[in-house]
Amino acid sequence: MPLCIENPMNKSVPSVLHLFESYLPHSQNWAFRMLHNLPSANTYIAALHYVNNQFKVPEFTFIENPDYAGHKMLERAEEQEAGLWSKLFSRLKNNILFSKYLSHLASQINLHKIDILHAHFAHTAWYFLPLKKITGRPFIISFYGFDYESLPFTYPKWLDRYKTIFNEADLFICEGSHGASILERYGCPAEKILIVHLGIDFIKAPYFARVKEPGRLNLIQMSNMAEKKGHIYTLQAFVKAHSQCPNMTLTLVGAGNDELKKYLIDYCIQYDILSKVRFIEQIDSGTMYEFLKDFDVMIQPSTYASNRDCEGGAPVVLLDAQATGMPVISTRHCDIPEEVLHGVTGILSEERDTDNLAQSIRTFYEMGREDYNRFARNARVHVKNHFDVKHTSQVMDDLYGMVRNLSDVPQKATNNPLVSGIAMALLSFNTALRAVYDNQKMKATVTKASNMASEIPFVPLITEM
């Protein structure tokens, strides 16, 4: 059920400015889904770069950029190919321009009477954090993926920057418990961390009653070409399973890293499976569900990359697949076990364990219609119960409303007025959120599935909750 906060204070609808570096790459469409389904909050968008008109909908108000604004203002001088003096001059110039841009945004925040600032990704938050002091507005930060571990691992100075944002920002949003544990490990106060699942527009996801017979399998992986997505482990498992599963295909949908793609194609040639593997750069989001209809299982062996890049939460496309009644083969990586229930909506392996991935492929290859249908129905019900964006957006909307109302209440003098003054209210809200996402029915299902792991494919059937 949606979480609704009854508050006797000001009931006015909050206006929220969402801060992005780029708005919005297609691969981040989950952010659009969340914002577009907010039931009441007024949505404003500010970004250094607007890259996709598909997401520039009339329901949102977009803060247009001055002519001087752009990505170059955030470029690190050490990455520019120039001499020392040129680097220093470039850094100074960018700092001046960005300070000017922040003043521009501050004037727009006051003009539009913005109540709350919400930065998406930690690196974006760091650069826009001065707006909190300039405007006095509450500042919320959402972590998603590379900003959890890859950014501070690659550039250690970000660990100190994280300490600053943990101290100065008011709230931090994570997709699941894994991401929340990372922030706590870095030193973020637990009472500032809220878990709000990303979701999908469930009502738009059709259920396909696929006919799965033993002795055939059409696999699909749909993700950007990146090390953390585990494409090479998909192919290695495919090769290991192929001798026992000859009537099998694999489709890889995704672009991004041309060097990785070439390596994957060369691997297919080396092991003589290129005739079984199809590479597709991209499909139109409007036809995605219809495209998925022709496949039996989605495979996504996510893993930590060499630079500590990770999913942070879990790939939203796994929810899209399950909503259509498609089981998933994946890994126990980050929050994937919350999206994919082992032995119930799919089968999970440890990261990089290609032997078990191959066994998962063989299990579904040999699976008959009845057992497959149990996985399929479980997958759809699980997404409906826990990842419908209508519910998750309602939770976010309630959060905005509470922060908007409580930020009007006079607070005691402190380094962090919002959190210090309303700590108990936020703690109560966080407790209510965990009641939504960690409900006993979901825990019972996971426990039951774990106990029955040895019985796969004889999986339990989830009933409507």
Image (cartoon, rainbow, N blue to C red):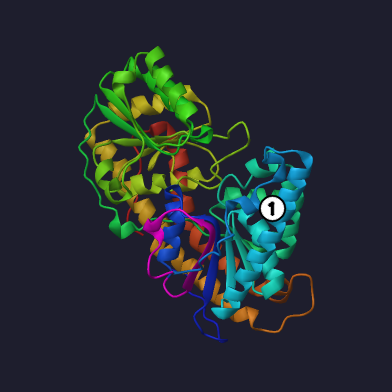
Position of residue 87 measured from the top left corner of the image (x, y, whole percent): 74, 44
Q: Is residue 27 left or right of residue 325?
A: right
Quadrant position of residue 218: top left
Q: Position of residue 373 (x, y in %)?
A: 26, 41
Identify the residue position indicated by label 1 in the image.
184
Query: Is residue 189 visible to the viewer in this orientation of the structure?
Result: no
- Location of the C terminus by quadrant is bottom left
* Image vertical order of residue 366 relative to residue 5, above or below: above
What type is the residue that disc 1 sits on? Answer: Glu
**Relative horizontal placement of residue 440, taking residue 163 as reference (left or right):** left
Q: At numbered mark 1, what does the secondary structure look like: helix, strand or loop?
A: helix
Q: Which residues are magenta?
A: 39-60
Relative to 411, is 434 on the left or the right? left
Q: Nearer the viewer, residue 234 or 387?
A: 234
Task: Say which of 251 and 369 sits in front.
Answer: 251
- Examine the structure image and report whether residue 190 is included in the region drawn in magenta: no
